[in-house]
Every structure is written in structure tokens, then in C-alpha cells.
Amino acid sequence: MASKRFFRTITLAVGTLATLASLGVASPAYADMTLLNVSYDVTRELYQAINPAFSAYWKKTTGETITVRQSHGGSSPQAASVSQGLQADVVTMNQSSDIDMLVQRGGLVDKNWRQAFPDGASPYTTTMVFLVRKGNPKHIKDWDDLTKPGVGVIIPNPKTSGNGRYSYLAAWGWRVQHGGTDAQAQQFVTQLLKNVPVLDTGGRGATTSFAQRDLGDVLVTFENEVALIQQEFGADKFQAVYPSSSLLAEPPVAVVTKYAEMHKTQREAKGYLDFLYSPEGQAIIAQHHLRPRDPKVMQQFASTFPPIKTFTVDEVFGSWDKATKSAFADGGTYDQALMAAHK
């Protein structure tokens, strides 16, 4: 009997839908919508807060139920996974070159993705700072201190991690910004790499090496990661050091057009990324120690963001594309510096 009632219910439901369609009445959605956000290592906590807030907002404004799943790893490997078939609806990366790669490989992302959202499709900024052990026993104050003998520096591998790329480019850029030539910058990063005992594949792995395995004297990482480590492990164990200047990071976001169209989630994917720019989204971003774009929200949280002079990839290298090719291509300046550091 239960089986007959089940099939009768299905028949009635189908009939009802057919009737509604014949009358031109939109039928209600019977299946919940799901989005996949493929992101980089150190945004886990951010999107664990953003996702339920967005779901609540979407339910309130549209009446639709939506769930957002998240995936994290090194920024470039994550982008590579999407290019190889990981069907992300949106990507939230830490460098524009990773999204450009998705444009170039199969047109997964629209070529005009930077114009799809405000601020070059970058809803927040951050920068590279230092985390040292309490009391700063090695007296680390600026980038040149990272090249001194006996100072252990923890950064992730620039070949596999956006965090590592920012760290490398920040060190190079700092030397150039202080009057150094490219040759002097090359020597500078070589000396820094001599002090790196291990190259983890991602930013979170580098954090584990420094904070849990007690490797090194200083961790170079994003400003928001420094704050998270202090919260997790206690401010009595570590302290933040802000260098005289550092590289501005403008993590970009994009709809993965090809997969969103396949999943029929274009509207929801755009709505999700739009939410990052809303006052609510910007406040959540600030609470997770990423610098919001909204001036009012930034003013509200100004006390949590020490002032720091920043320079951009474009200013030092011309563009992310040029920086990636000159520094991280096989045989580039990073490979040369690493080889020289371990002679």
C-alpha cells in the first residue's frame, strides 16, 4: 500500500506541475541549490562565516534555499584542479594569474572577469607581514633581517602556493623599492632562501611548521593568517611585526562561467560574489582580518589594521603575468635563487 501511495503522490505532483506550466505559473523549486567555492589555503575560516550568512541572506531575499560548499588548498593547485575538471561555480583566489589561467584553458572564466565586480573583482586586500615568537628574540623588524645568518624563515613554496609567491615578490620588491637593482634583488632573495629550512606546499602547511612544529624564527604570511594564529595559539606565544613596506595583495574572485552555466547557477554564483561587497559581507571580511573595500566598514574596523606602506606587483614587475613568467617559470629567478642558496 505504501508503494502505491508513493507512486500516486508522484503522479499527482507531476500532474500539478504540468497544470501549472500550462497556466504559465512558475512552479516552486523542489531541489535545494548548491554552489562550490574553490578557494585558497588561508580563507577557510572566512568562508565558514560567509557561507551561512549568504545562505540566510539569499533565503530572505529570494525564498530559495542555497548551500555553499568550499574547497581549499594552494591557490595555483586549486586553479589547476578547476582547469582539470573540479566543477567550481566560483573561484576566490589569491592572485589574478590563477584566474587568468582559467580564462586561457578552455574559457572556463569570462575574459572580462575583472570588470564583472567592483575594484577589479577584488573584494578585499591584505599584505605580507611577519609573525615572530614572543619577545622577538631575533630582533626582526624588516625584510633585510630575514637574510641575517641564524634566522630561520618559514614561507611556503612559491611554485605551489600563492602565499609563497607573494612572500617572494614582496622580498624582491622591497629590495627594489629601497634602491636595489634586479641583480641586487636576486642576491637578496637568494640570501633569504638560504634561511628557509622547509618549503611547505601551501600557506596553512607553513603555519603548521612554524606554530606547531616550532620550525623557524619568523613566518612570512598574510596579515589575516597572523591574526588567526594568535587567536588559535594565544597572543602570549607569538607577536606580529609589520615591515616598513610590503606587497599589496588584492585577492580576486570570479564566476566559473562554463560550470555555472552547466549547473544553471549563474544567478546564484553572481549573487554570492556580490554578497562579498555588501556591508554585511564586508563586515565579515573585516572580522577575519582582511582589509575591506567599503570605506565605512574599514573606518569601523580601523583599529585592527595597523598602517603599512604597500607597493603593487604592477609597480615593481609590470603585471602579474610578467612577474609569474620572470620569477616562477622553469629557470626563472626563483629557481636560480633556490639553486644558488643550496650550493
Image (cartoon, grey):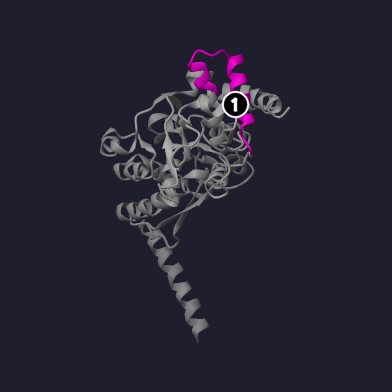
> How many residues crowd around disc 1 within 10 Å: few (fewer than 14), some, or many (20 or more)?
some
Left or right placement of residue 288 versus residue 149 in this view: left
Q: Residue 272 lies in magenta, yes or no? A: no
Q: Which residue lies furthest to the right in this view?
A: 343
Instruction: Look at 46% across and 42% down and name the residue there.
Output: 225
Find the magenta span and give its range: 172-197
Residue 116 visible in the picture: no
Residue 324 place in picture, x, y as percent = 59, 26
Q: In which quarter of the image is residue 294?
A: top left
Q: Hey, what amino acid is under mark 1?
A: Thr
Left or right placement of residue 25 versus residue 259 in this view: left
Residue 261 place in picture, x, y as percent = 51, 45
Disc 1 secondary structure class = helix
For the image, the number of numbered tags is 1
Name the quadrant of the C terminus.
Answer: top right
From the image, tell me which residue sits under label 1. 324
Residue 93 visible in the picture: yes
Residue 248 place in picture, x, y as percent = 44, 28
Query: As displayed, is residue 15 above or below residue 209?
Result: below
